[in-house]
Image (cartoon, rainbow, N blue to C red):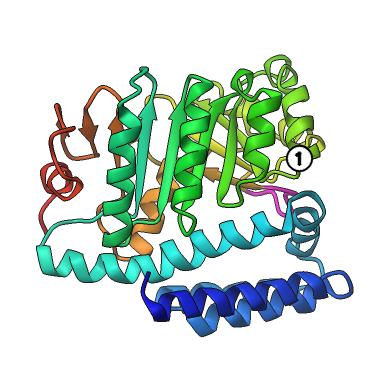
Amino acid sequence: MELQHRLIRQSINIAISKAIDDMQNNTRRSIRNLLDLGLLFASDEDQKRFFSTAKKAVSNPHNPYNAFVARVIANVNIDTIKTFSINLGYSSLTYGANLLRKLQAKLGCSMPWILVFDLEHQNDCFFDHLSKYICDARDMGIYSFLFRINAETDIAGIIALAEKFGECAFILETPSVLLTDKALADISRIHNLAVLVRTENSMENVSSCDTVFQKLHSYRCLYGFHTGYNKDSLGSVANIEYIDKMVSQSCLFGAYVADGEMAAPHRDGLFSNANPLKDTTGLPLVTIDLFSDIRSISEKIAAKGQYIVINSVGEAYSAYKKIESVFNLALIDIIHEVMPQI
């Protein structure tokens, strides 16, 4: 890690720590101070515009952000709040984005700002490849990683990676059944990891996750829900009743994914155009259209590569191209293969 990067991280950590302490007395003022800090470290006009707009929003005494931030402080381990926010907001979307823009211009190839690792099929050797991919990705400026798992044994491997790469942001997408007491205890001590619990598009199936949500809350983890949707099911998962249920389980965010998103990354617009929540203000949690918003962030930071999926059977793909037998390739070679030239 560059000395300047490390010093800036330390400075941000100190500032966030003070702001969190101050929030016990004046949440609104502390949020404004954090936004001022964001403006100070903003690396481009889009980021400056975002923080300026956010400052105007929080100046409204009826804005929902004060209550939301209060929920975060009350429910999540303070070290997790600080570490994950710095890793995602600064290391990935500020410092890392700057490295990606430079590398993109140098290589003439679109660069992803996040990698998705799909562990649907068991492959113990895949973790050896993951460590190398993440090391190379970090050197390029990629600091964010999403893991889709289907086996409890994968959790230990991901925790080991999160400990090894402490300045990166890790997101774990998992079925609730894999979150055993041991897994939850291990996750709770990892401060650069957020959890997305897969839920279905019915209240009955959501209720089956109640115990896991309650345990995540008791361990003060950073977590939310993950649900698929299509045009027929959107109304059943994007409504106030569904959101209220998730809030009652102390979820802080919800990730929506259009059916077939991983196979058809161009499927945009359904959530934003048909979402019943779109005209609702003051939602007590953050809702995102996961892969659509990943692409939106990519456009904002001028990293045109969006994201790449690498799975445990040795396939890699993006919105542009799919290739096989990638385990004998370096990450930069995979990027060259599946990302478009610019």
Q: Which residues are magenta?
A: 279-285
| Residue 247 seen in the figure | no
Query: In x, y percent, where is residue 107?
Result: 11, 63
* Left or right of 132 on screen, residue 290: right
Give the residue type that dot 1 points to.
Tyr
Does residue 282 show up magenta in the picture? yes
For the view shown, which residue lies furthest in the right direction? 25
In this rendering, the count of numbered labels is 1
| Residue 87 seen in the figure | yes
- Magenta highlight: main SS: loop
* Left or right of 143 on screen, residue 12: right
Q: Quadrant of residue 258?
A: top left
Query: In x, y percent, where is residue 173?
Result: 52, 32
* Left or right of 333 on screen, residue 269: right
Query: In x, y percent, where is residue 79?
Result: 68, 58
User: Mark 1, residues whose alpha carbon is within 10 Å: few (<14), some, or many (≥20)?
Assistant: some
| Residue under pointer 1 | 219
